[in-house]
Amino acid sequence: MQQKTLLIAALCVAAPCSAQRISKPVTSPSRAAAPSGDAATLRIGAQRYRRSHEATILREFSDLLALPNVASDHQNIRRNADMLVAMLRKRGVDARTLELEDASPAVYGVLKAPGATRTVILYAHYDGQPVTASQWATPPWSPTLRDKSLAEGGKTIAFPADNTTRVSGETRIYARSSGDDKASIVAMLTALDALHANGRKPSVNIKFLFEGEEEAGSPHLLAILQRYRELLTGDVLLLCDGPEHQSGRQQLLFGVRGTASMELTVYGATAALHSGHYGNWAPNPGAMLANLIASMRDDDGHIKIAGFYDDVVPVSRAEQAAIRAVPPIDSALRRSLGLVRTEDNNAPLAERLMAPALNLRGLSYGSVGEHAANVISTEAHASFDFRLVPDETPERVREFVDGHIRKQGYFVTSDSVTMAMRLAHPRIARVVWAAGGYPANRTAMDSPVARAVINVAADSTGKPPVVLPTMGASAPSYVFAQTLHVPVIIVPIANYDDNQHAANENLRVQNLWDGIELYTEIMGRLGTAEWR
């Protein structure tokens, strides 16, 4: 997901291999005994199909991963889209690309189920983050199997030659987009194969939407949805992206935070000045910026900008109950990151993600260490991102932040700073907001469709999933909610340590197997589940 880099700290899923990791409370989440009735039949059928086709599944996955897929690589993005259309058509799906001028093609498919009264939209993205090949243990678009993770000393092994060779669930497949997000696509298409092999039809009409620009910020997603709105009607959109919970359990997420970001510069003299001759006389931009930042947030992450919390919707009872039920991973997470405390008196991570955040993501002023000089530099820079919750908007956040900086005695401008400005104002702040930004989005956790998806996921895994009101990262799921008028639920399957966005991205094979079972259950039973 775009902006998922926040998860490096917040969810510990994108750390490079050299980073310390949480000791997995559940290294290989064991499945509970299969539920009775139709759920058991579907699950056992999916397991049987997968076990007799593991080599075929991994070969198709590897072929898809072997296609470079950086969003700016238009030729290879088109090759990815064409392959996905072919993969869908192979399963009897009516598939095509959705075209928009200057946009990467979106892949669309529809599979109607006889007698189905509900339609589920399955969304994933097929583009991936750029790579620095020299940072990878093996080439990023040469899928490689290892008997376990690189962090655990995993060794390269051969792909299975035929379907008689079983593949351990602890095996990892290393390639760009293995976890983020081609695994979801292969899992849902294999689920169709499993249903067919067992003589079953989906219980819902299924619409597939695979985006090719998500890692570039989804610049054309809104326009694509608006142009093809009639094709994309449905009852719920399942956003199939992201990692499992750090406990190793399946999780469902019912929201994402919104985002806004800005660059801030404060100014001193027009030339660097000797700190002995001019210190305590000439304004020091570094000290000015430090004080300005301290006026905006405290050490516990509370935002001190007047009005910033005015639009925040209180956490609902259902959301509060979900947070209380999250497996306790904070102590282990703190230990793995070398932290003796975290903000807000060690409040749980799941609780903190329900609040807006002001993140200082970069500072630049002067030099340090062997490059330090006794000068007062001319300007100081800071970069911020803001994580928003319902009902905050980027427009209102900009209004509050700009107003706060003015109250600290600054003349605020987004233009280049001129000598006339310098001579007219004792303090100047250049504030440049990034284009775009978007609001948060949440689906009510006690809604009928939410309960149905939770129940079906529980039947698939044999235990209740971890249910979270929101993830810490930002993604434009509001576009789906506002344009298609559907509730959005995030259904991730990747391992939490998949190195998404980083070098040596990987997928734990057991997560692929479990994802196949989950999507089989969703396709086979969501239409018959009680939405009440």
Image: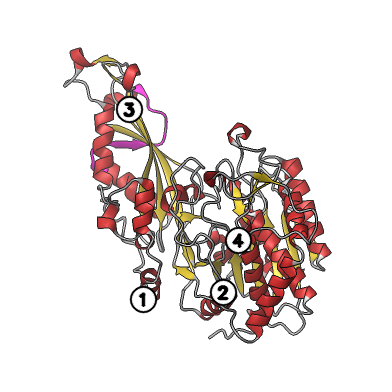
Circle 2/circle 4 CB separation < 8 Å = no
Taking the image as shown, residue 487 lies to the left or right of residue 173, namely left
Label for residue 457? 2
The color scheme shown is: secondary structure
Taking the image as shown, residue 269 lies to the left or right of residue 58, namely left
Q: Residues within 10 Å of mark 3 (few under 14, many from 20)?
A: some
**The residue under label 3 is which amino acid type?**
Met
Identify the mark nearer the N-term, 3 or 4: 3
Quadrant assignment, res 423:
top left
Q: Residue at x 37, y 47 (%)?
A: 337
- Closer to us: 53 or 98: 53
- Closer to us: 414 or 63: 63
Q: Residue at x 70, y 80 (%)?
A: 203
Classify 343 as above or below 135: below
SS class of the residue under badge 1? helix
SS class of the residue under badge 4? helix
Q: Which residue, given by chain and number where applicable, does mark 4 sit on?
A: 511
Q: Which residue, given by chain and number where applicable, does mark 1 sit on?
A: 317
